[in-house]
Amino acid sequence: MGRQETDSDNRTHTIGRRRGRLGGILAGVLAAALGLGAAGPASAQQGQDEAARLVFLAAAPGEGRPASAGDDLKVLTLDRLPEAGEAELQVLAALLRSNPVSTFVATPDGPTGARTGDLHLVLDLALAKGEADQAVSVSLGGETMPLDAFAGRLSSLVSAFNAEARQMAYLRIDDPEDLLAAALADLRGAIEPSGFAMSILMVGADPATCEGPRAPVHYAIIGGIADSDPFGDGDGDTTIAEATAYVSAALQRNVTRQEPCAARYSLILRGDDDPARAVVRAEATPIFPDMETAVYQEKFQALFLMSADEEGPIRDYLQTCTYCPSEAALSDRLREIGERQLALRLETGIWEGIRDDTDPGRITVYLENCKLCAFRDEAEALIARLEQIDATRDAEAEAFRSLAAARDLTGLRGWIADCVACLQREEAAALVSELEADTRVQAEAAALDEAVTQRNAELIEAWLQECEVCAAKGEAEAALAGLQEQAVAATACLTAAGLPQQGGPRLLSEINQMAARALCGSVLAAHPGNPLAITALGRVEQAAGNMDEARAAYEAGIEAGIAAAYGLAAHSLYAPGDGNVADYTGAEQLAREGHARGDWLSGEVLTVLYSRELIEGQGADDAFAIALRDAESGNSVAQFFTGYFYRIGAGVPQSDSDAVAWLTQSVDQGYVHANSFLAEIFEEGGEGVPQDTERAAELYWAALSAGDPTALDRLANQINDRPSAIIGAIQTRLRDVGAFSGRVDGIGGNNTASAIRVYANSVQTAN
C-alpha cells in the first residue's frame, strides 16, 4: 500500500512505506489528519518517484551549489544520523519538509513497496580517538559514536530511502590526528554494506576553520558534467569510469592550486566492479543550467587557447577555471610550449656562436640538424651572402679603384652602401671623409643640392660644366637624366596645358580641355606620377572651374619641386574665382618661393601684389625690381610690366623712351596686351619718342584682331579721343575686311564704333 505526495509544482512523487507498526500508525495518522479514507493498493506507477535524490547528512547543501537548479533534483537534509529504529521516521520527516504539500494514500495493513529514484549521499564527519576497545570513533551532526554504531545507523538510513539504486556517497572527513590509515579497514567495513556503487573519501580540514568552499564534486557529477564532452562520451549516462576520472582530476586540481579547503588526500572506493555502470542518468532538461553554461564557455576558452604560443594565458586559465574542460590537452600544450622554448634557447645559443662565421660549413650543419630552425631564414641568407662575396670580390675591387681615381664622392658612398665583400671598405670610408672635408666639395655639394631641389635642369647642366672637383658628378648626371626624361615625356602635355614658359598657352581660355586631358593622361599612363603632367592637368581643371582639383594638382607639383606649381597655386589664391575670398598673404608666400626657383608666373603675381600695395611693407619699388629681373630673363609679361612702370613712373623715374624699349620687346614676343600701351605712346609722342600715328594704328589693329579688350575699349568706347589719322587708318582696315561700308573720313562716330564692335565679335567667335 502506498502514499502519494504532490509538490508545489504539481509534480507527483511516491514514497514507499516499510512494514511495521510505526509505518501503519503514521499512515493512519496522516490519513486522518489530511481527511483521507482508506484505499486499495496503489498502482506501480503511483508507487514510484523516479527523480534522483541528493541527501546531505550533517552537511550544508548551499556550499558550492550552482546558482540555479532544475526541478528534477530532489535535495533532502538531515542534521544528524538517525538511530537505527528512527531512520524511517527521520527520512519521512525530511521528505515532508522538502515539499510544501503532500498527499498520502495508504492502507493500514502493509506497504506498497514504493521506491525512490537513485540515491546520492553527502556527509561530513570527523575521526577521533575512540574509548576502550574502539580505536577510532566517528563524529557527525554533533554526536560521537563508535565505527560499528556508525555502520549500522548508516545502513538503516540508506535502507529507509528504499532507493532504485545507491549510486554515490561523498564522505568529507576531518582527520586532524591522521587516524584514517589505522581506521581505513573498519571505515570501509562501515561504508560498503550500504551498497553504493562509488564512495569518495575526501580527507581535509574542518570546514569551520578554513576559508572558502570545498570542491562541490557531487553537484558536478549529479549534473552530468562528467559525461559531457570533453570529460566523457556524452551518451547521457555518467559511468563509474567517467565519474572516477572527473572527480580525480577535480580533487587533484584543488590540491595543485593549494585551495584553502582542498582535501589533503582522497580515496575512491568502488562498490561495483563494472566501470561502465551508470551512476547518473541525464535528465531531459539540465539540472544546473548555469553550470552547463559555464562549462560551455570554458570549453570555448580552452579551444582558443589550444593554438596559443604563450604560457601565461594557459596558466591563468588552468589556475582559475572551475570545471576545466580540455585540462589535459592544455597541460600538454604547456609542455609543448616549454619544450619549444627550451629548444629555442638552445638554437639561439648555437646561432649566436656561428652567425659571424665567414665560412658556410657550420651554418650548413645547423640547417641540416636544427629542430625548430628558428634562424633558417637568417642562416640561408648568410650562406647566400658568403657565396655572393666569393663571386663579387674581384668586381668590387675594380669598381672601387675606378671611383677612387675619379674621386667620385657619390659613387664611393654608393659603393660602401652596396658592397658585398667590402674588402676596401676602410679605404673607401677614409677617402669619403677626405672628400667631405674638402671645402670645394662642400661648396659644390651645396650648389648641386640647390639645383636638384629646384629641379632646375639648366643649373644642373651648368654645375656639370663648371665643377672643379666634381665629387657629386654621378648624382648630378642622374638627377639631370631624370629631369630630362620627365620633361621629354611631358612635352605634349605641357604644349597643350603648360605655362608659356613651358611652351603652353598663356590664357586658360586658350586651353583645349579635351585634347589636354587626353595628352596629359597618356603621359601619366606611361609615366605614373610625372609631376609636370600632374601640374599641367591642374591648369586644365582650373580652366574647367574645378578649383579644388586644380589646387590639389598644384600641391602635388609643389611637393615634387615643380617651380611652375608655386606660381599656379599662388595665382589661385590671388584670384580664387567667384564667391571666394582672396588670400594675398598665402599667395605672396607661394610666389616668393616659386620666384626663387625661377618661375615667371610667381614673379608676375608678386609684381601685381606689390604694385597694388596689397602686401604690407611692399610697394612699387619692389614690384619694379621683380619685373625688371624677369624682363631681363626674357619674360614678355615682365617686359610689359617694366615698360608700364617706366611709362607711369612707378618704382622708377618716368621715361617714355625706356617704356617704348621694354613694351616693344614684349610686343615682339607676342604679348598682345602690350600693343595698346605701346600704341598710346606713339599716338601722343613723348620725351625722346616722336609721334607716329601710323605705328600706333598698326599696334591698335593688331591688338584688336587678337581680341585684346583694351584695344576694343579705346577704339570703340573712346573712338572720339583718338587722332583723326588713327581713326582713318582703322576705318581703312575695317573696310578692307568688309566690316565697314562708310566713308573713310577720319571722323569717329557711332557707325565706326559699331563696325569695330562687330569686327571684334567676329574675331572672338572665330577663335
Image (cartoon, grey):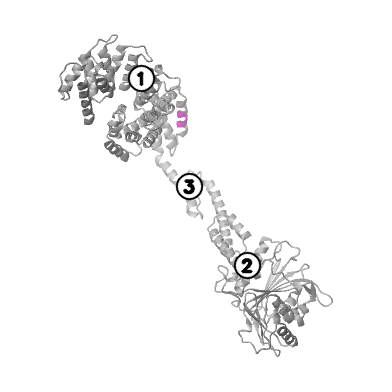
Residue topped by disc 3: 378
- Asked if disc 2 and disc 1 are in contact, CB closer than 8 Å, the reply is no
Q: Position of residue 747 (x, y in %)?
A: 20, 16
Q: Which circle, 3 or 1, is nearer the viewer?
A: 1
Identified at 54% across, 46% down, the residue is 352
Mark 3 burial class by Cα count in 10 Å: few <14, some 14-19, many 20+: few
Q: Which circle, 2 or 3, is nearer the viewer?
A: 2
Above or below 515: residue 19: below
The answer to whether residue 547 of the structure is visible from this angle is yes
For the residues marked 2 and 1, what is the alpha-carbon distance in whole angstroms?
A: 93 Å
Mark 2: which secondary structure?
loop
Instruction: Please report whichever mark, 2 or 1, sits nearer to the chain's N-terminal start.
Output: 2
Mark 2 burial class by Cα count in 10 Å: few <14, some 14-19, many 20+: few
Q: Position of residue 59 (x, y in %)?
A: 72, 70
Residue topped by disc 2: 68
Residue topped by disc 1: 627
Residues in magenta, as a range: 427-432
Q: Locate the C terminus and report the quarter of the image it occupies.
A: top left
Q: In the current view of this chain or complex, which residue is farthest to the top?
A: 688
Q: Name the one closer to the observer, 477 or 68.
A: 68
Identified at 41% across, 30% down, the residue is 581
Q: Name the one closer to the observer, 109 or 113.
A: 109
For the residues marked 3 and 1, what is the alpha-carbon distance in whole angstroms?
A: 63 Å
Identified at 69% across, 77% down, the residue is 95
For the residues marked 2 and 3, what is the alpha-carbon distance in whole angstroms?
A: 58 Å
